[in-house]
């Protein structure tokens, strides 16, 4: 059981995600997590004010079930499959983060400086981050699951362009904007 | 019954994202600093299996569980929407350290600020729906 309780290696995580994607294809579906945001907008009545949300969202209920499962999976991981070990990130990364003011680097799963203090600045970070994720995924027509995993597995050029975009955005955020934000 | 299959697949996915640390803000930061192979190995493994499996499904004319021929819709050709949209998403991904799947895995894990992130992600998607006609695609 110890191997289950310890952090899982990257090749186990990557393999599971690929198998999940392939099973969804065999079930006649497409792996794409961020589509759920559009589905939820539609289910909440977004179609009344915006044509983009006027579609048969009930046909996407399977994906909402998948989302529900993902929440349960996170819950089970922490409650029953965790020994509380922090990700063993690179020493150089820990050092860099300490210099940025993240004392929790190397000892926590997530930076407690952002996720455990309800300051105005943190709320702004969460809000802006959320908007960027929701806006960007729909603009790009997919997120890491739809483009980086499904799309690239299908050798789709648009997905490669999207993934290049993900990296440009991520590199700009971490290297140009982080020093200004933190 | 079928609903249960999707819930179970989601459970396995959520556990893999959390336990293999793809849901860790620190792993995403480390990836964008190119200081570890972890996330690259994660994606490379997924792609190795994903490419072989997807191409095999396409070549074998496989049918899905309902007996329908599996057709994977190609994505429409464009550069602008994928690049611009991708940059917006990438910035959000790096800032909150989670893509959409992990946002919900972390909610389950009890990281409550992620609920706020999810609400604003819904708003972001709604914003896209309103202004999409004015955006270059």
Image (cartoon, coloured by chain):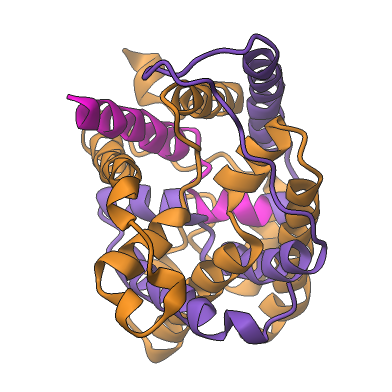
Residue, x 50% and y 49% (percent of image)?
A: B24
Position of residue A144 in the picture relative to residue B4 (left or right): right
- Report the span colored magenta: B1-30
Quarter of the image where the C terminus of chain B is located: bottom right
Query: Which residue in the rendered view is the most extreme toward the front?
Result: B68
- The answer to whether A36 is drawn above or below residue A53 in the figure is above
Main SS, magenta region, reads helix
Q: Nearer the viewer, residue A165 or A29?
A: A29
Q: What is the quadrant of residue B88 in the picture?
A: bottom right
Residue, x 73% and y 67% (percent of image)?
A: B81
Query: Where's residue A96, x and y in %?
Result: 70, 62
Quarter of the image where the N terminus of chain B is located: top left
Residue, x 44% and y 31% (percent of image)?
A: B16
Q: Nearer the viewer, residue A169 or A56?
A: A56
Picture colour for chain A? orange
Picture colour for chain B? purple
Query: Which residue in the rendered view is the most extreme toward the bottom?
Result: A120
Query: Where's residue A10, x and y in %?
Result: 59, 28
Query: Where's residue B4, x and y in %?
Result: 21, 28
- The answer to whether B41 is drawn above or below residue A107 in the figure is above
Query: Where's residue A27, x and y in %?
Result: 41, 24
Q: Is residue B118 visible?
A: yes
């Amino acid at each position: 059981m110890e191997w289950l309780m310890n952090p899982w290696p990257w090749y186990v995580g990557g393999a599971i995600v690929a198998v999940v994607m392939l099973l969804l294809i065999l079930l006649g579906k497409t792996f794409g997590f961020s589509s759920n945001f559009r589905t939820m907008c539609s289910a909440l009545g977004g179609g009344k004010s915006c044509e983009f949300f006027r579609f048969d969202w009930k046909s996407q209920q399977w994906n909402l079930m998948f989302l529900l499962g993902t929440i349960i999976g996170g819950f089970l991981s922490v409650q029953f499959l965790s020994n509380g070990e922090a990700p063993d990130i690179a020493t150089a990364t820990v050092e860099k983060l300490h210099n940025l003011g993240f004392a929790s680097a190397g000892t926590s799963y997530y930076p407690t400086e952002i996720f455990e203090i309800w300051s105005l600045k943190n709320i702004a970070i969460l809000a802006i981050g959320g908007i960027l994720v929701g806006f960007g995924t729909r603009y790009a027509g997919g997120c890491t699951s739809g483009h980086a995993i499904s799309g690239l597995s299908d050798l789709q050029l648009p997905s490669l362009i999207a993934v290049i975009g993900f990296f440009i955005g991520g590199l700009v955020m971490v290297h140009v904007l982080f020093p200004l934000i933190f | 019954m079928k609903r249960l299959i999707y819930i179970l697949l989601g459970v396995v996915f959520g556990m893999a994202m959390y336990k293999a640390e793809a849901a860790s803000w620190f792993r995403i930061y480390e990836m964008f600093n190119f200081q570890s192979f972890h996330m690259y190995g994660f994606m490379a493994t997924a792609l190795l299996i994903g490419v072989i499996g997807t191409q095999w499904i396409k070549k074998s004319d496989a049918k899905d569980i309902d007996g329908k021929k599996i057709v994977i819709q190609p994505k429409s050709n464009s550069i602008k929407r994928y690049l611009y949209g991708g940059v917006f998403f990438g910035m959000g991904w790096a800032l909150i350290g989670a893509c959409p799947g992990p946002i919900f895995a972390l909610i389950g894990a009890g990281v409550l600020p992620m609920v706020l992130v999810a609400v604003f992600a819904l708003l972001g998607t709604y914003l896209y729906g309103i202004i999409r006609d004015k955006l270059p695609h």
